[in-house]
């Protein structure tokens, strides 16, 4: 019985535990070039952090196109500490471009930035929905 307890403890210690990240939840994006915005659900995807579009809105707040619902907007992000996330990509549906990206969490706001080669774009500040 003692051996079983030791083995169980060893398995628990060696199993990686994925703690909930402060960035997890739903975020309202900044308005795009057309004034449209969305809600992105940020969650754990394996060992990385990703986010998919769960709602889309037109500039007047009405329900937007459903074409991109369920698509990944953010992927391969890692926690770099102190609210910084990087090493991932963000897809901008309005421009249909994918940017090497980083995000900075500050309470209920998430500053987003993306770059293609040496050209960087401010992705705006997202606000927490829940």
Image (cartoon, rainbow, N blue to C red):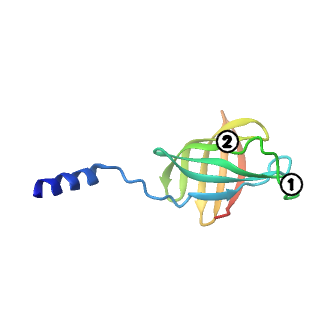
Name the side, left or right, on which 29 lies relative to 41: right
In the rendering, which numbered label is found on residue 59? 1
Q: Position of residue 93 (x, y in %)?
A: 75, 40
Q: Nearer the viewer, residue 28 or 84?
A: 28
Name the side, left or right, on which 54 lies relative to 46: right
Q: Nearer the viewer, residue 61 or 31?
A: 61
Q: Earlier in the sequence, mark 1 or mark 2?
A: 1
Name the side, left or right, on which 91 lies relative to 85: right
Q: Quadrant location of residue 119?
A: top right
In the rendering, which numbered label is found on residue 71? 2
Q: Secondary structure at mark 1?
A: loop
Q: Nearer the viewer, residue 94 or 7?
A: 7
Residue at figure coordinates x 18%, y 51% from the top left: 7
Q: Is residue 3 above or below residue 106?
A: above
Q: Position of residue 71 (x, y in %)?
A: 67, 41
Residue at figure coordinates x 67%, y 52% from the top left: 40
In the rendering, which numbered label is found on residue 95? none
**Residue most extreme to the right:** 60
Q: Quadrant of the N terminus?
A: bottom left
10 Å crowding of disc 1: few (<14), some (14-19), many (20+)? few
Q: Is residue 88 above or below residue 17?
A: above
Q: Are marks 1 and 2 in contact (CB under 8 Å)?
A: no
Q: Secondary structure at mark 2?
A: loop
Count of number-bearing discs: 2
Q: CA distance from mark 1 to mark 2?
A: 20 Å
Q: Quadrant of the C terminus?
A: bottom right
Q: Position of residue 55 (x, y in %)?
A: 73, 52
Q: Position of residue 62 (x, y in %)?
A: 85, 56
**Residue most extreme to the top:** 117
Q: Nearer the viewer, mark 1 or mark 2?
A: 2
């Amino acid at each position: 019985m003692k051996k079983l307890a030791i083995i169980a403890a060893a398995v628990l210690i060696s199993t990686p535990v994925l703690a909930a990240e402060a960035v997890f939840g739903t975020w309202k994006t900044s308005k795009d070039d057309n004034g449209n915005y969305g809600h992105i659900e940020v969650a754990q995807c394996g060992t990385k952090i990703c986010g998919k579009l769960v709602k889309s809105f037109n500039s007047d707040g009405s329900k937007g196109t459903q074409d991109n619902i369920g698509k990944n907007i953010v992927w391969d992000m890692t926690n770099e500490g102190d609210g910084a996330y990087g090493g991932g990509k963000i897809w901008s549906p309005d421009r249909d471009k994918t940017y090497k990206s980083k995000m900075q969490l500050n309470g209920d706001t998430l500053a987003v930035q993306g770059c293609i080669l040496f050209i960087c774009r401010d992705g705006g500040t997202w606000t927490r929905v829940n």
